[in-house]
Amino acid sequence: MKIQHLAIALLPVLTGISTSSCGKEVNDEKIPPVAVNIELNNQGLWDTYGVHGYGQYRIFIKADNIPANFPYTALSYTGFGGVLLISGYANGDYNTPLAYDLSCPVEAKQTVRVGIDPDSYEAVCPECGSRYDVCEGEGRPVSGRAVNLNYGLQRYRVVAASLGGYTIVY
């Protein structure tokens, strides 16, 4: 009889523990912290290599010289697996530049990089199949193993530059 009373007494506690995980924040720090510095900090660079309409994207991978002819310098860094720059919705604007690491946080390998599904504007991992909302959901997982693990894409800051354009930093 005592066990039954103990179980009844613990029921609210156990329920609270199991439901508290539903509201936890997405883990967007699964990818190791690696320097990011991509300077698109004048209007000419932004016009050439920036993103200008909802869903338009660019990929930056210094080690692979992507994009070709981009003026990388000794102070340019493109994160763990590269950087995805995409135009999305934030702060009431549909043309806000957003940036993420290209590495899938489920796989956590530099060479396993997400790609963009042109129909949904979601980032998709070619290995685990996880999908991420990169235009409006801050890199949150929308399907696949990433949802179960609560892993989102690593986000980077896109900072307006004084001469036009932006700089992407960690």
Image (spheres, helix red, strand yellow):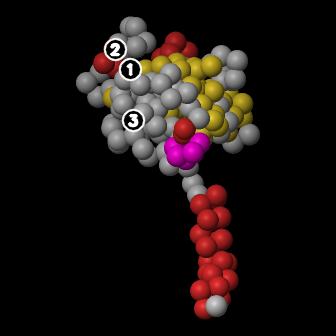
Which circle's residue, 3 or 2, is located before the other in the chain?
Answer: 2
Q: Amino acid at mark 3?
A: Ala
Residue sitting at x 56%, y 32%? 130
From the viewer's perspective, is 150 left or right of 71? right
Residue 78 visible at all: no
From the viewer's perspective, is 153 left or right of 16? left
Which residue corresponds to mark 3? 108
Q: Amino acid at mark 1?
A: Ile
The residue closer to the viewer here, 88 or 114, is 114
In the image, which residues are magenta? 147-151
The residue closer to the viewer here, 63 or 146, is 146
Residue sitting at x 64%, y 59%? 23
Residue 61 numbered mark, or none: 1
Residue 64 numbered mark, or none: 2
Instruction: Identify the element where label 1 is drawn.
Output: loop
Q: Is residue 53 magenta?
A: no
Which circle's residue, 1 or 3, is located before the other in the chain?
Answer: 1
